[in-house]
Image: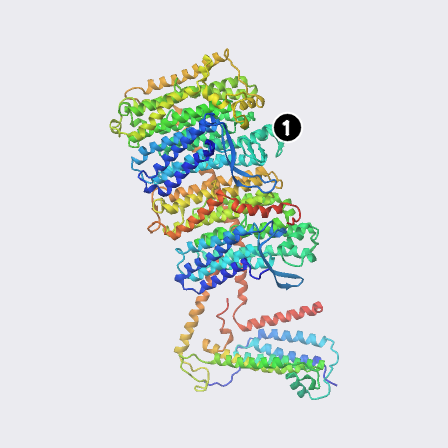
């Protein structure tokens, strides 16, 4: 099997109509709205002003802005967390044999055994939840 | 003469709707991620446009943050796609429907 | 005012105990919980002995163990941590603490799985109950009122009988919807009062309402109509908890499925929340409305009495019999409350205590028999009097207590209610209505005697494969304590009736009596 | 100095103590608790006699006592009544205390023979029950207000339940116990309404005024009297009507406990209990309580002609009705049971017809001879190894002479043969009914006469069934092996029989009214006892004296005596001769039918009436039908309604929401694209709505 790109055949065009409708409505709204002329920026370096705004040095920037130091730090942390999270999600559990994506050139090379094991684990876990749910609703309904 | 604000909005709406279209019509999780990226950038266009409209840089700063967050989102998103693949042997999002009712 | 009064101490100890017990290993959980619950008993008995409250908590009486701290500001209303006791809540608090301890002891035998969680939830419920009976700020009260449901839900739903899920969900949804209805009614009053109140303090609202005239038109309802609507909604809401016919059907299911100790708490204390709230809200705050509609309200009360008794007559399950008879007994409370006479109010409040003790005793006794026989169906058991003489003796005593045998608490309460209702000027045709309600004492004798004859006496036989022997001491001990309490209160009702009367008498005076 | 009156509460407290001791320590005692009971009842008897002597003025200056001793419930508010417990001692109380404690003592002693010697188990429970029974009855007797009376009345009911159901391992006794409690509870229901009504009307339930530090507390009969004089209205009724209603309500309890028609059905079933208990129930405690209550509050009943008429009619009817049923019974104790119902009917007749002394007199004599008969029957039952069927007996006369002669004494008293106790009292009852019936104007008089006629007819039946019983049991040839060789009884059976046997023969002498009237000798001691030697009678301060009652009877319902046949003496002689003649007629008929060596059943001669009588006029059937044919189906229907309709609505609501939920949840397909599509569509719709509506603002 090659990993050559193919034309998508599983496209659900009917749902796409919703997106089209959304565009129509938005376009209608925007085009009929009465918008005054933009104010534009004052003279000066925009990029520099952005930099100053990020570090709360508003008095040095030429263009009006707000301080974003806290947001900057927070986003730094979030990025860090996201990275950690991504690594955690992506990492295989210890007992699984480590198969790198590159080694077999794609996603499709995992052993059948491992996957079916996973599958059954997941099934039984979810299946039990399912059963309990159904049971309780039946209790309520029948009596 | 600057371009009227409506057209920025129109552009952003178009890109946003293309993103939405992608999400609605495709089943591949990676395409989903790309579509979401499009939608985020549509929002960025709006931010920059309104920043210009109000003469205030806050919108532009915001769009920078959005990009940073988009990066974070992609990182997590791809992680999720990996897990999805591991659990379902596929990245077709319509198959991961075990948690419904 | 010290930050932490006895009430806070009670709550704190119980909550802390609950968490300790949650963490304790199963083997020790029962004993530990019982030991912990002795602290609230001791504290509440001490509180009773130094009780110095006078008058009604909502009508300007002197509160005992009061504390009033600012809590949250919500718009133009200040929510406060306001707790305190008067002559109505003090006995109920005692009832809650004492009954919890006894119920905990009676759980040692039947509860044999997830023990630490069971006992923890029981203590959690005790804490909430303490809160319900002490809180005097509506929001605080509502928090506790709702908090009671959560442990109860789990206690029924996890440790209950075969249909426990159905019963637990029914109980939870039913009472929760009732709370919603009641809440709407109460908030209508609050909004109707508008600027004349600045807190959710029950006393402030009650006094504003009793002085009259402060109520403004709300949502197109004139003040008089607003009172009526609010009264109806609140009555409907609380009636579910009492429970009053026709919103009683959650009770038998909950009782039958719940494990014995939980039934004890449910019948002994939780039902009293309903009547306590009726007394505090409907009959204190909206006195005129209650008086004007006494005929309808008393009809619900009397109907509950007779209907509950008739239903009890048709049951085969001992627990169901007691459950339906609870409906009957709580109907008397309604009859007493609506009479608007000193003995009516006093007797109704006393009946809450008396019925709490007696129904608790009754459920516990049924539980002890169940522990040995593993069945509660009347037809399955007979002649166990020989095998477990003390338990059966107490069963007989409890049954007669339920029938209103003089010198037991139930008689005192019922007599006072009858006395109050008979002389009522509010109830139309009071003597006749009272007489109809009193017929319950005949029916109650009918079904209890019948059940006793079939189960306890005659030749020994048992449909289940268990060997019936004497109940262990720790099963019988709580029964003895309860029976002793029932008799002590029956011989000397004044032990609690004095403070009850002191607290309910201001209800009869027009307007607010300042002490 | 502490006088006898200070110890009156101890009269009831001693048996109560015996109850506690027997219950908890009885199993460690050699006689299983009997010791405590005997000591306590003996103590009660001594104290009662001391009290009686004090009332008679022999051991102190105070001759009556009425105090509130204990505040049960204090009414704080003005309009709230205060409920108290107190002690009232007047001649009636003193007399009854002596009777009750005497019978209780004898029954305790007899129980040694009947229960201990027979090797019964569960004796501590038995003696505890007896103790509590005695205690409740004694406390009931000295109650000074109607609420206290009611409370102990109920305790008496409880004890009867416990004792009748003593042999709980069999099926019969628990059922009988249930019936006894339930039927009397039905009567007590009305009694309780009456009590509540009396308190609500008068604010007090005192039988007699109490001199308290704060002033005199009036009694409710007196207040009722005043109210009638002043024509007040209560609850929308005139005073007279209201008093009648209250009186009849209280009468409900009396009818239940004293086993009057139509609530008498529990009493024959109550024979399932041990025989000494039957003796106690019938002679002195439970059944007597009802009649005693009417006598206790006679000042109240005397105010209502309707109530008097009802009492007299119920009494007369019950006397006749029960006597006819007694004629066909096979079992010794059943005969006695119906005779009890019948005799209490006489007492009610006397009370209704204004014969207060006659009623108390008959209560006294009946207590003695009925206790005797039951204990004698118990003795026979021991001898017969607990076979009670009279057709299996016969010829016991020679084998158990003590039992026979004492039993005969009691039977003569019951049949009303001169000079045994029953003759004097029954004769006086009938005489009073006759003269008041003739003397009273209007319907009330006619009612009295009707009741008198029924009472008179019952005398014949009484004579017949009593001696049918005696002949079948003791005379003729022994019909079974057991009867040929009966088990001997010991002193503890014979001693109580002897005491009572002598009593049954002689106790009538305390009030030989006919002799007094004829000879002019003042030997109507009981009359004097209840009336008092002084002008106006004593104790005047209590207004519970005979003199006061006679005044009331004369003033309010206008009950007056008149002598239809010549003067008082002639009427007296004719009346006495009539009742004696009828009684003798009954005795002779019994002798001719059953006084032979090999008696046979003659019940078939009754024809259709036999079935009616053996089935007790289908009273039990009808009441069982009322309970099982009406109430139980009604309860089942209510249950169906509850489960189906009321709970059905609740479950309906829940299934509707569950159903809609189960449909709506289909939206949650789990496919992300669908969710996104829905969101998009919703957004579109929202925007369109805004556009159409022209924005938010």
Residue D3: horizontal and vertical position, in percent?
46, 31
Q: Is residue C369 visible?
A: yes
Q: Nearer the viewer, residue C233 or D505?
A: D505
Q: Quadrant of the N terminus of chain C?
A: bottom right
- The way the protein has been coloured in the rendering is rainbow
As drawn, C186 above or below C440? below
> Which residue is tagged 1?
D230
Q: Is residue D658 visible?
A: no
Q: Nearer the viewer, residue D315 or B29?
A: D315
Residue C230: horizontal and vertical position, in percent?
63, 52
Residue D140: horizontal and vertical position, in percent?
47, 34
Would you say A39 lies left or right of C326 here?
right
When asked about the image quadrant of residue A52, the answer is bottom right
Q: Nearer the viewer, residue C173 or D680?
A: C173
As drawn, C17 above or below B89? above
As drawn, C58 above or below D445? below
> Which chain's residue wears label 1?
D
- Pick out the residue farthest to the top: D566
As drawn, D184 above or below A49? above
Give SS at disc 1: loop
Would you say C167 lies left or right of C134 here?
left
**Crowdedness of circle 1 by 10 Å Cα count: few (<14), some, many (20+)?**
few
Residue C454: horizontal and vertical position, in percent?
39, 43
Give the mark count.
1
Would you say D354 lies left or right of D18 here?
right
Residue at coordinates 39% horizontally, 26% vertically from top-left?
D368
């Amino acid at each position: 099997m090659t990993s050559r790109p193919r034309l998508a055949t599983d496209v659900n065009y009917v749902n796409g109509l919703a997106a089209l409708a959304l565009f129509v409505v938005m376009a209608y709204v925007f085009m009929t709205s009465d918008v005054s002329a933009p104010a534009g920026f004052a003279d000066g370096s925009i990029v520099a002003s952005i930099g100053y705004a990020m570090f709360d040095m508003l008095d040095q920037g030429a263009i009006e802005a707000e301080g974003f130091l806290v947001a900057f730090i927070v986003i730094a942390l979030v990025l860090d967390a996201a990275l950690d999270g991504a690594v955690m999600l992506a990492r295989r559990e210890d007992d699984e044999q480590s198969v790198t994506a590159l080694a077999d050139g794609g996603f499709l090379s995992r052993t059948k055994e491992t996957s079916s094991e996973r599958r059954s684990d997941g099934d039984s876990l979810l299946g039990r939840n399912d059963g309990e749910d159904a049971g309780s609703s039946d209790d309520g309904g029948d009596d | 003469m600057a371009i009227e604000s409506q057209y920025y909005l129109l552009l952003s709406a178009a890109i946003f709707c293309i993103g939405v279209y992608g999400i609605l019509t495709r089943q591949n999780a990676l395409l989903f991620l790309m579509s979401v990226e499009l939608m985020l950038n549509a929002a960025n266009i709006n931010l920059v446009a309104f920043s210009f409209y109000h003469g205030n840089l806050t919108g532009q700063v915001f769009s920078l943050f959005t990009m940073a967050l988009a990066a974070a989102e992609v990182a997590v998103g791809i992680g999720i796609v990996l897990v999805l693949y591991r659990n379902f042997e596929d990245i077709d999002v319509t198959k991961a429907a075990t948690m419904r009712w | 005012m010290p930050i932490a009064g006895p009430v806070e101490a009670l709550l704190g100890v119980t909550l802390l105990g609950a968490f300790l017990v949650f963490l304790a290993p199963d083997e020790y959980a029962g004993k530990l919980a019982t030991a912990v619950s002795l602290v609230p008993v001791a504290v509440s008995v001490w509180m009773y002995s130094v009780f110095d409250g006078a008058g009604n908590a909502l009508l300007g009486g002197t509160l005992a163990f009061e504390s009033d701290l600012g809590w949250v500001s919500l718009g133009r209303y200040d929510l406060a941590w306001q707790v305190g006791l008067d002559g109505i809540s003090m006995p109920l608090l005692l009832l809650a603490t004492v009954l919890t301890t006894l119920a905990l002891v009676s759980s040692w035998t039947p509860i044999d799985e997830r023990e630490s969680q069971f006992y923890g939830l029981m203590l959690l419920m005790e804490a909430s109950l303490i809160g319900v009976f002490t809180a005097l700020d509506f929001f605080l009260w509502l928090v506790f009122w709702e908090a009671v449901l959560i442990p109860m839900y789990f206690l029924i739903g996890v440790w209950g009988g075969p249909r426990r899920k159905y019963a637990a969900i029914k109980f939870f949804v039913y009472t929760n919807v009732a709370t919603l209805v009641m809440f709407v009614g109460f908030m209508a009053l609050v909004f109707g009062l508008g600027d004349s109140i600045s807190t959710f303090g029950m006393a402030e609202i009650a006094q504003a309402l009793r002085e009259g005239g402060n109520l403004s038109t709300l949502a197109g309802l004139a003040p008089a109509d607003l009172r009526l609507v609010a009264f109806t909604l609140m009555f409907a809401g609380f009636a579910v908890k009492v429970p009053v016919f026709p919103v009683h059907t959650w009770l038998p299911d909950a009782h039958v499925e719940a494990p014995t100790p939980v039934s004890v708490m449910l019948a002994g204390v939780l039902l009293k929340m309903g009547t306590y709230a009726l007394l505090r809200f409907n009959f204190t705050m909206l006195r005129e409305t209650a008086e004007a509609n006494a005929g309808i309200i008393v009809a619900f009360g009397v109907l509950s009495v007779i209907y509950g008794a008739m239903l009890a007559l048709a049951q085969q399950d001992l627990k169901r019999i007691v459950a339906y008879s609870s409906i009957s007994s709580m109907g008397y409370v309604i009859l007493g409350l609506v009479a608007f006479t000193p003995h009516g109010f006093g007797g109704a409040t006393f009946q809450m205590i008396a019925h709490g003790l007696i129904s608790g005793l009754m459920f516990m006794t049924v539980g002890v028999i169940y522990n040995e026989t593993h069945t509660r169906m009347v037809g399955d058991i007979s002649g166990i009097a020989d095998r477990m003489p003390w338990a059966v003796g107490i069963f007989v005593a409890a049954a007669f207590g339920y029938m209103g045998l003089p010198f037991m608490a139930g008689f005192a309460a019922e007599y006072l209610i009858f006395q109050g209702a008979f002389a009522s000027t509010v109830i139309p045709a009071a003597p006749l209505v009272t007489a109809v309600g009193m017929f319950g004492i005949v029916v109650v004798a009918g079904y209890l005697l019948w059940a006793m004859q079939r189960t306890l006496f005659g030749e020994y036989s048992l449909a289940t494969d268990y060997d019936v022997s004497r109940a262990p001491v720790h099963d019988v001990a709580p029964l003895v304590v309860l029976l002793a309490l029932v008799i002590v209160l029956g011989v000397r009702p004044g032990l609690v009736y004095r403070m009850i009367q002191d607290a309910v008498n201001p209800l009869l005076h027009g307007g607010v009596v300042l002490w | 100095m502490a006088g006898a009156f200070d110890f009156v509460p101890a009269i009831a407290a001693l048996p109560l103590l015996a109850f506690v001791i027997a219950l908890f320590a009885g199993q460690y005692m050699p006689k299983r608790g009997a010791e405590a009971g005997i000591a306590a009842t003996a103590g009660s008897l001594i104290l009662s006699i001391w009290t009686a002597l004090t009332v008679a003025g022999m051991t102190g200056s105070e001759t009556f006592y009425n105090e509130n001793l204990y505040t049960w419930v204090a009414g704080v508010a003005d309009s709230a009544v205060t409920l108290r417990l107190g002690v009232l001692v007047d001649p009636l109380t003193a007399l009854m205390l002596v009777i009750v404690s005497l019978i209780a003592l004898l029954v305790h002693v007899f129980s040694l023979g009947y229960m201990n010697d027979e090797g019964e188990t569960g004796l501590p429970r038995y003696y505890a029950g007896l103790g509590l029974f005695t205690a409740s009855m004694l406390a009931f007797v000295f109650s000074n207000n109607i609420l206290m009376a009611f409370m102990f009345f109920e305790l008496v009911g409880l004890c009867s339940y416990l004792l009748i159901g003593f042999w709980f391992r069999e099926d019969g006794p628990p059922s009988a116990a249930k019936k006894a409690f339930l039927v009397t509870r039905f009567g007590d229901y009305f009694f309780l309404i009456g009590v509540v009504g009396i308190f609500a009307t008068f604010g007090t339930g005192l039988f007699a005024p109490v001199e308290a530090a704060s002033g005199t507390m009036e009694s409710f009969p007196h207040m009722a009297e005043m109210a009638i004089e002043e024509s007040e209205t209560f609850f929308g009724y005139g005073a007279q009507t209201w008093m009648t209603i209250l009186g009849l309500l209280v009468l409900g309890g009396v009818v239940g406990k004293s086993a009057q028609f139509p609530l008498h059905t529990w009493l024959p079933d109550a024979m399932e209990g041990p025989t000494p208990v039957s003796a106690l129930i019938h002679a002195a405690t439970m059944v007597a309580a009802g009649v005693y209550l009417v006598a206790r509050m006679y000042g109240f009943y005397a105010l209502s002609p309707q109530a008097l008429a009802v009492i007299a009619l119920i009494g007369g009817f019950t006397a006749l009705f029960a006597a006819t049923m007694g004629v066909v019974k096979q079992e010794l104790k059943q005969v006695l049971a119906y005779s009890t119902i019948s005799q209490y009917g006489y007492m009610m007749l006397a009370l209704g017809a204004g014969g207060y002394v006659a009623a108390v007199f008959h209560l006294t004599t009946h207590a003695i001879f009925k206790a005797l008969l039951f204990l004698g029957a118990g003795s026979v039952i021991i001898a017969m190894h607990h076979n009670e069927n009279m057709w299996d007996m016969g010829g016991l006369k020679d084998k158990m002479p003590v039992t026979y002669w004492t039993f005969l004494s009691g039977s003569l008293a019951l049949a009303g043969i001169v000079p045994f106790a029953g003759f004097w009292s029954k004769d006086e009852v009938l005489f009073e009914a006759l003269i008041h019936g003739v003397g009273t104007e209007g319907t009330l008089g006619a009612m009295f006469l009707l009741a008198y006629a029924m009472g008179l007819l019952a005398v014949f039946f009484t004579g017949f069934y009593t001696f049918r019983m005696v002949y079948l049991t003791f005379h003729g040839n022994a019909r079974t092996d057991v009867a040929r060789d009966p088990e001997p009884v010991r002193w503890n059976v014979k001693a109580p029989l002897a005491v009572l046997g002598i009593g049954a023969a002689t106790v009538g002498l305390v009030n030989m009214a006919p002799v007094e009237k004829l000879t002019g000798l003042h030997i109507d001691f009981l009359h004097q006892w209840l009336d008092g030697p002084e002008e106006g009678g004593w104790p005047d301060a209590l207004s519970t004296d005979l003199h006061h009652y006679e005044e009331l009877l004369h003033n309010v319902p206008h009950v007056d005596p008149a002598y239809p046949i010549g003067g008082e003496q002639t009427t007296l002689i004719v009346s006495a001769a009539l009742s004696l003649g009828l009684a003798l007629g009954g005795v002779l008929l019994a002798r001719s039918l059953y006084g032979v060596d090999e008696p046979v059943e003659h019940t078939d001669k009754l024809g259709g009436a036999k079935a009616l009588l053996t089935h007790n006029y289908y009273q039990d059937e009808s009441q069982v039908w009322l309970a099982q044919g009406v109430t139980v189906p009604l309860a089942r229907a209510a249950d169906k309604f509850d489960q189906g309709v009321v709970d059905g609505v609740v479950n309906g609501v829940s299934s509707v929401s569950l159903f809609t939920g189960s449909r709506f949840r289909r939206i949650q397909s789990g496919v992300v694209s669908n969710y996104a599509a829905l969101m998009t569509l919703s957004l579109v719709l929202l925007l369109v709505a805004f556009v159409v509506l022209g924005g938010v603002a």
